[in-house]
Image (cartoon, grey):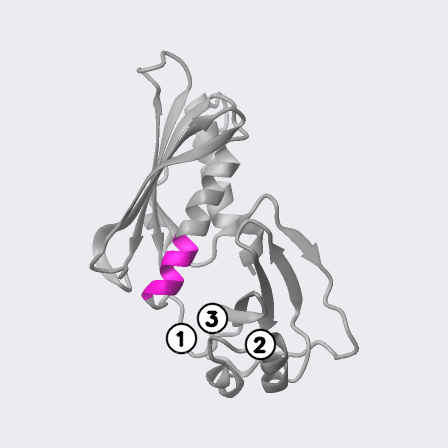
Amino acid sequence: MKKLLAILLTAGLLAACGSEETTTITPDEFKQIEEGMSVDDVKKVVGGEPESIREIDAAGMVEYEYVGENGIEDDSYVSLLFKDDKLDTVIERGIVTKSESIDPEKQNVEPIEKQEVERTDEIKEVVKDKVESDYDSTSIKEITVNEDAGKGEGYIVLAYLSFDAKNRSKTTKDMVTLYGQDLGATLADQPDINEVTVFWEAPYLKEGDTVYKLNMQRNGEGMSIESENFDQGVFD
């Protein structure tokens, strides 16, 4: 199962602690959880500690991830993100909502040659590995890597991604923002990448259109955000 909080380079892993035992979460318990609840409120509903607790330092959040029990899918889980001890974001997969199946053959990602690997293909593979290993409910539409003609050296990355979870607009906005910025931070470790632009679709909210565009450019050893564009018809 993918782990949501692997998305940030600064994320730290905390072991679930306390006297309470680790527990699972059922559909009935999930339906009782509401935004604004405290950690203790949630534990009272669910009956104990989550499978894992992780910090998102950059967002000032802590994630509690519960394994699902008796959900509509076998590998169901719920991720609860708390800010200042208040439940801010709820993400579920397979508890009460069936996740969208993704056909790998339909993802427009160029294969990596087994013999001589071009630098552009290496960069595409970095993007592909990051998305597939760390970003829940995300599929790849296309990855383009171009030489930076303006600077005469280095590369520009264009990543076309789709956030496929059936979540409300606030949750979707939070997740695509976090994932997009994290992808930029990951590619900043590649010193020859000068610019990254991430184009996000969210089919559950709006079919077939880009709802969020994030452009980042190199600033020293990192990437700085140059522009963000949200579809105002989707994100209020």
- Disc 2 or disc 1, which is closer to the eye? 2
Name above or below for residue 53 compared with residue 147: below
Residue bearing the label numbered 1:
97
Q: Element under label 2? A: loop
Label total for image: 3
Mark 3 touches mark 2? (CB < 8 Å): no
Residue 92, numbered circle: 3
Instruction: Give the percent coordinates (x, y) of residue 189.
Output: 55, 30
Instruction: Give the percent coordinates (x, y) of residue 56.
Output: 58, 54
Give the spatial CA distance, label 2 vs label 1: 24 Å
- Disc 3 or disc 1, which is closer to the eye? 3
Name above or below for residue 160 compared with residue 28: above
Instruction: Give the percent coordinates (x, y) of residue 147.
Output: 35, 19
Q: What crowding class fits label 1: few (fewer than 14 Cα within 10 Å), some (14-19), or many (20 or more)?
A: some
Position of 182 compared to 145: left or right? right
Name above or below for residue 54 compared with residue 223: below
Q: Amino acid at mark 3?
A: Glu
Task: Decide which of tag 3 and tag 1 comes sooner along the chain.
Answer: 3
Q: What crowding class fits label 3: few (fewer than 14 Cα within 10 Å), some (14-19), or many (20 or more)?
A: many
Position of 142 compared to 128: left or right? left
Q: What crowding class fits label 2: few (fewer than 14 Cα within 10 Å), some (14-19), or many (20 or more)?
A: some
Residue 38, numbered circle: 2
Task: Decide which of tag 2 and tag 1 comes sooner along the chain.
Answer: 2
Name above or below for residue 143 compared with residue 56: above
Q: Amino acid at mark 1?
A: Thr
Q: Amino acid at mark 2?
A: Ser
* Quarter of the view holding residue 101: bottom left
* Quarter of the view holding residue 14: bottom right
**Residue at x 53%, y 69% (from the top left corner):** 80
Mark 3 touches mark 1? (CB < 8 Å): yes
The magenta segment is 169-176
- Disc 3 or disc 2, which is closer to the eye? 2
